[in-house]
Amino acid sequence: MSPSAIETTSTAGASAKISSKFNDLKKPTQHGATYPRLKKRDIFLRAAEIILEQKAALEETMIQETGSDPIWAGFNTHLAREGLLDVAGRITSIEGSIPTLSEHGRSALIYKEPYGVILGAAPWNAPYILGFRSITYALAAGNCAILKAPEFSPKCSWHICDVLHKAGLPKGVLTFITLSTEDASPRTTQMIESPIIKKINFTGSTRIGRIYGELAGKNLKPVVLELGGKANVIVWEDADLKLAAAECAKGAFLHSGQICMSTERVLVHKNIAAEFETEFAAATAQIFPSLSTLINPHGVIKKRLPNHRLPLKRRLHPPRHGAPPQLQTHHQNVPIILKSVTPSMDIYNQESFGPTVSVIEISTEEEALRIANDTEYGLSAGIFTRDLQRGLRMARAVESGAVHINGQNGTVHDEAGLPHGGVKNSGFGRFGSTGLSEWVRTKTVTFMN
């Protein structure tokens, strides 16, 4: 279903017999573990080339399925390709060790082995970045994988599997599964509970992540979770205000704020608050002059109603009540900047996952850090200051998986060469530069010489 045109773009059949998919995976499991590393490297390198060759088709599918603008779709194919190239370069880095033992004549070998079959589930909002990421590290480490497609963007997930298979991935090492909305919960539970699945990788909301975590724990299976966020940016009084305003606007409203790292609260020093608010509203109007498209009408209603309940003095953008006539569509809303938000309001605590950001005044470092850490989430954060030592000091005190000082796009930053993941209720485990280590387990073998 296209959120922009509100029409069906493609159909996908749900997998009625999940058990048959599992049976297909039993035999090739060892094939995935023993497949030569250099051949796997070449497969990922070829897949990166195919993304370039099919770039237009991949991006068009994403735009149709998710309502993305061309810039965000292009960023997705670019970062997905960069991720494949990075994984290809790391495949040969998995290594064991030969430790020294206390007993004379006894030696040991430490092996790093794949788990077997893993389940990867990624959301619709960045389907190529997150979809490839959910399986490529595991495949590179020698595992087989099941890619469970999100209900909102199944064709994007199909493209991921198609790219890898065209690149030469052996048959059976990667299995693609789609589920209907009605079947998603029981079928996913069935997969997690199956003894064939050895580890789970889920990216999505904290609410659903808890369910994955509970099911994995019940079945004593390890899980990697990257969940929701409530990203804060601290704008100190010495910050470059034009830079901070522009990057906070991008961080808040890229892809209509439907990014787990989106900037949700801007904590601005009271001495420059008025000037920053003016710059922030102007930057938002300039960079995002048109309506934001959300994935479904529930998102629009959720963002629109709290906005209309707030007094005019609490809204910096748009500068008036009411909605323009074109806002009456089911999937669109305007970027919204709020001020005078207090801890008693839902918007202070809850992840909006939409084009909404709050501006909160602060007076001291201590107050800024207290508010920044006053959230259940901890995925990404940002700081704008000309004093690098101050920025580094505050960054160490922020409870977050990543903190970006004077960064592009505020809190929205991820690249393959860096570890990526959250703390607190934003999940655990890491992708990026340390991602391969998540998908191997350690075996110790001792012997007498």
Image: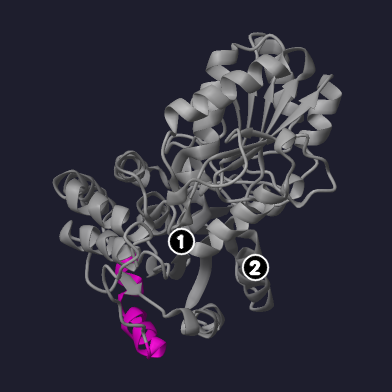
Q: Which residue is located at x 53 percent, y 62 percent?
A: 202
* Residue indicated by mark 1: 330
Q: Nearer the viewer, residue 384 or 270?
A: 270
Q: x%, y% of residue 107?
A: 56, 53
Mark 2 surroundings within 10 Å by alpha-carbon count, few (fewer than 14), some (14 through 19), many (20 or more):
many
Structure colour scheme: one colour
Q: Nearer the viewer, residue 67 or 117?
A: 67
Q: Distance from label 2 to label 1 (Cα)? A: 33 Å
Query: Quick one: label 2 or label 1, which is nearer the N terminus?
Result: 2
Element type where label 2 sits in the image: helix
User: What's the residue type where badge 1 is placed?
Assistant: His
**Left or right of 173 on screen, residue 354:** right
Q: x%, y% of residue 242?
A: 54, 14
When the figure is inspected, residue 154 is found, relative to residue 23, above or below; the finding is: above
- Dominant secondary-structure state across the stretch colored magenta: helix
* Residue indicated by mark 2: 213
**Left or right of 311 on screen, residue 305:** left
**Left or right of 176 on screen, residue 331:** right
Region rendered in magenta: 16-32
Q: x%, y% of residue 199?
A: 53, 68
Quarter-of-image position of residue 162: bottom left
